[in-house]
Image (tube, helix red, strand yellow):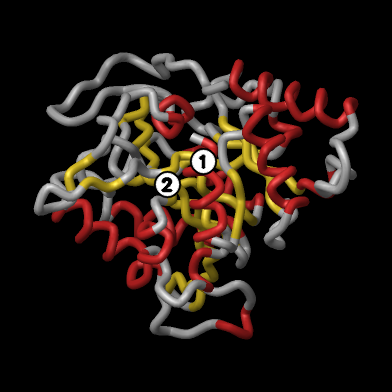
Amino acid sequence: MNPRTERTGPPRRTRRAVVITLGAALAGSVAPPALAAAGHGRRVPPPLRRAHAHNDYEHPRPLTDALSHGFASVEADIWLVGDRLLVAHDSTGLDPRRTLAALYLDPLLRRVRENGGRVYRGYDRTLQLLIDIKSPGDATYRALSRELRRYRGILSTCADGGVRRGAVTAVVSGDRGARPAMEAERVRYAFYDGRLTDLGTAAPASFLPLVSDNWGQNFTWQGIGPMPARERAALRRIADRAHAEHRRVRFWATPDVPGPARDAVWRELLAAGVDHLNTDDLAGLEAFLRAAR
């Protein structure tokens, strides 16, 4: 089940973009062609809208590896060090060369320019860049907002409640201290990742198009044996409610060891309509989703 398409503000048109909700945009409200050309008549499969690369920066080739497997969402953890946004899981792994710009924003800018305004040539789909703030949220987001402004030509934008979809959609997660500064901006180049407790609140989807939460804190089932009927019903209620509010759903800390248990959880997530499947195993999730099509 996909989020419904709706307008989030008065129509604002450019040659390449239409104002629509981010939930609908990332869910694929604009249908891509069945296959895209990749040179010399070769065909490539479509990008995987439900594939999310958790801690993407820990792969040998950040961003590039995820895109080579067709992922439509990647995650980068950031720390504010001085005036620089460094990418690492914890403070002991900080490297001044591994900035958000160097690992993600600059490569995406080049790729979009080379691909005629798209991350995946031939497919009209926005790539979600989930930015998980690890250092204090207010100061880090203010630095991030200044950084994203430099890349506004490729980013989805929210202005006065109206959303213009870009080739890349930045969504801010992590430290909750970022929220007040984000809500105060009249023009934003990023969106907010809420929690399940944000369902049913007044926060518009133009601000909060995604809700993410810890799987183990909401469900006991880890893929062994049948999923309890009560938990299956709860999962579907969560997805249905989020979609009714034009939001997408993601769970982190789902089982990620290759095997039947992980596949069983992934099947239940797909059946419930959960929008993003979280993994560190790029090849494993690609194979699973291609087979499930």
User: Quick one: label 2 or label 1, which is nearer the N terminus?
Assistant: 1
Q: Residue at left 62%, top 63%? A: 136
Q: Count the marks.
A: 2
Q: Is residue 107 left or right of residue 68?
A: left
Above-or-below relation of 209 to 170: above
Query: Looking at the rendering, which quadrant does residue 7 occupy?
Result: top left
Query: What is the three-letter code of the residue carrying label 1?
Result: Arg
Q: Nearer the viewer, residue 61 or 6?
A: 61
User: Which residue carries the number 1 mark?
Assistant: 50
Disc on res. 72:
2
Q: Secondary structure at mark 2?
A: strand
User: For residue 233, which quarter of the picture?
Assistant: top right
> Residue at point 51% right, 51% down?
287
In the foreground, 182 or 125 = 125
SS under mark 1: strand
Residue 63 at x, y percent in the picture: 39, 63
The answer to which of 90 and 216 lies nearer the viewer is 216
Residue 27: percent from the left, percent from the top? Answer: 45, 30
- Extreme left residue here? 40
- In the image, residue 276 lies at what x, y percent? 57, 41
